[in-house]
Image (cartoon, rainbow, N blue to C red):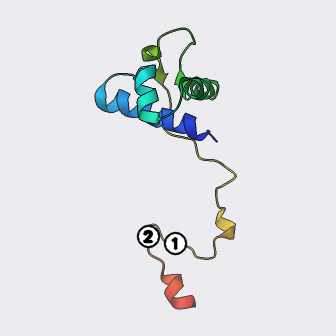
Amino acid sequence: MLSDTARKLLMIMRHCSVHHGYMPTLEVLERKSGRTSGKIRAGLQELTENNYILWEFGKPLESAVVVEGWERPDSRLERSEENSPIQWGVDGSNTDYWTMY
């Protein structure tokens, strides 16, 4: 799981690159995220280590590339089908709810 800062930075970077066609600068990230430059650098390090972005420290932030624009699902939070008491149909219907209860 990503930290709150890293998750927010990833959303801002993806939004800027997809919708506006540019990668934000450090100043833009500070303004839009409300975080300090130290926390932003730690968040960028976390995103780089987890392969969400490609970026080398020392290069301008505008050279970063977003590899994966959203957080991966956490396997610890997924519900298994065995634990689900109600079975839902493909179209979202659930006749068992009305016939079994």
Helix, strand or loop status at disc 1:
loop
Q: Amino acid at mark 1?
A: Trp
Taking 84 as reference, is 17 left or right?
A: left
Residue displayed at 65% across by 61% down:
79
Taking 59 as reference, is 91 left or right?
A: left
Residues at discs 1 and 2 in contact (Cβ within 8 Å): yes
Helix, strand or loop status at disc 2:
loop
Taking 27 as reference, is 73 left or right?
A: right
Taking 93 as reference, is 100 left or right?
A: right
Q: Amino acid at mark 2?
A: Gly
Q: CA distance from mark 1 to mark 2?
A: 6 Å
Rendered image quadrant of residue 15: top left
Which residue, as the protein is rendered here, is positioned at the far top?
Answer: 58
Q: Which residue is under mark 1?
A: 88
Residue displayed at 66% across by 62% down:
80
Rendered location of residue 12, percent (x, y): 43, 34
Give the label on residue 74, or none.
none
Rendered location of residue 71, percent (x, y): 55, 41
